[in-house]
């Protein structure tokens, strides 16, 4: 069976629309969790229902967001060692983004995998700029 050029264009446009829809869902999920950091499961399901999304599909998107965060980053393939003091400092600094130690540590490790004294340099830069830590 041969697919026409028109059918290929339709399929590509449909895939693009689906990808855009998924990005919109991800944005809504991010907003939802920004405003509800620890929602009970019933609220997550109710939110999915309000969006008209199957709760299982909604959970798949949530899992893909988590997988994207934890499955990427410079620390993922880092085979060196982290300086304990830099890592401790990094976790404290990154808590400005989260109240989860696991996520804060992951962010810190990503930075330290890139630059072993990242937080020392960040502190120096902030002091020079007159920014309090």
Image (tube, rainbow, N blue to C red):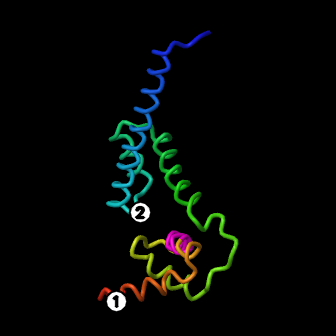
Q: In the picture shown, does residue 85 fall above or below 104?
A: below
Secondary structure beneath disc 1?
A: helix
The circle drawn on residue 38 is: 2
Rendered-image quadrant of the N terminus = top right
Magenta-colored span? 102-110
Disc 1 to disc 2: CB gap under 8 Å: no
User: Foreground residue, 74 or 60?
Assistant: 74
Q: In the picture shown, does residue 63 fall above or below 49?
A: below
Q: In the picture shown, does residue 2 fall above or below 22?
A: above
How many numbered discs, if any? 2
Dominant secondary structure, magenta? helix
- Residue 2: percent from the left, percent from the top? 59, 10
Tell me the crowding category of disc 1: few under 14, some 14 to 19, or many 20 or more residues within 10 angstroms, Cα based.
Answer: few
- Residue 23: percent from the left, percent from the top? 40, 44
Secondary structure beneath disc 2?
A: loop
Furthest toward the right, the residue is: 79
- Residue 71: percent from the left, percent from the top? 59, 57
User: Foreground residue, 66 or 114?
Assistant: 114
x 45%, y 76%: residue: 94
The circle drawn on residue 76 is: none
The circle drawn on residue 128 is: 1
Q: Quadrant of residue 74?
A: bottom right
Alpha carbon of mark 1 to alpha carbon of mark 2: how far? 37 Å
Q: Earlier in the sequence, mark 1 or mark 2?
A: 2
Question: In the rendered view, does 70 fall on the left or right side of 58?
Answer: right
Q: Tell me the mark number nearer the camera, choosing from 1 and 2.
A: 1
User: Foreground residue, 32 or 73?
Assistant: 73
Q: Quadrant of residue 117?
A: bottom right
x 36%, y 46%: residue: 47
User: Foreground residue, 106 or 112?
Assistant: 112
- Residue 104: percent from the left, percent from the top? 49, 73
């Amino acid at each position: 069976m041969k697919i026409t050029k028109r059918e290929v264009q339709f399929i590509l446009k449909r895939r693009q629309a689906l990808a855009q829809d998924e990005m919109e869902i991800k944005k809504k999920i991010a907003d939802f969790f920004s405003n509800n950091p620890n929602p009970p499961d019933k609220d997550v399901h109710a939110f999915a229902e309000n969006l008209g999304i199957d709760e299982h599909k909604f959970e798949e998107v949530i899992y893909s967001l988590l997988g994207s965060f934890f499955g990427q980053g410079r620390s993922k393939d880092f085979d060196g060692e982290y300086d304990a003091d830099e890592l401790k400092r990094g976790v404290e600094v990154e808590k400005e983004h989260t109240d989860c130690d696991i996520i804060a540590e992951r962010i810190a490790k990503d930075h330290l995998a890139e630059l072993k004294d990242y937080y020392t340099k960040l502190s120096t830069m902030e002091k020079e700029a007159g920014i309090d830590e």
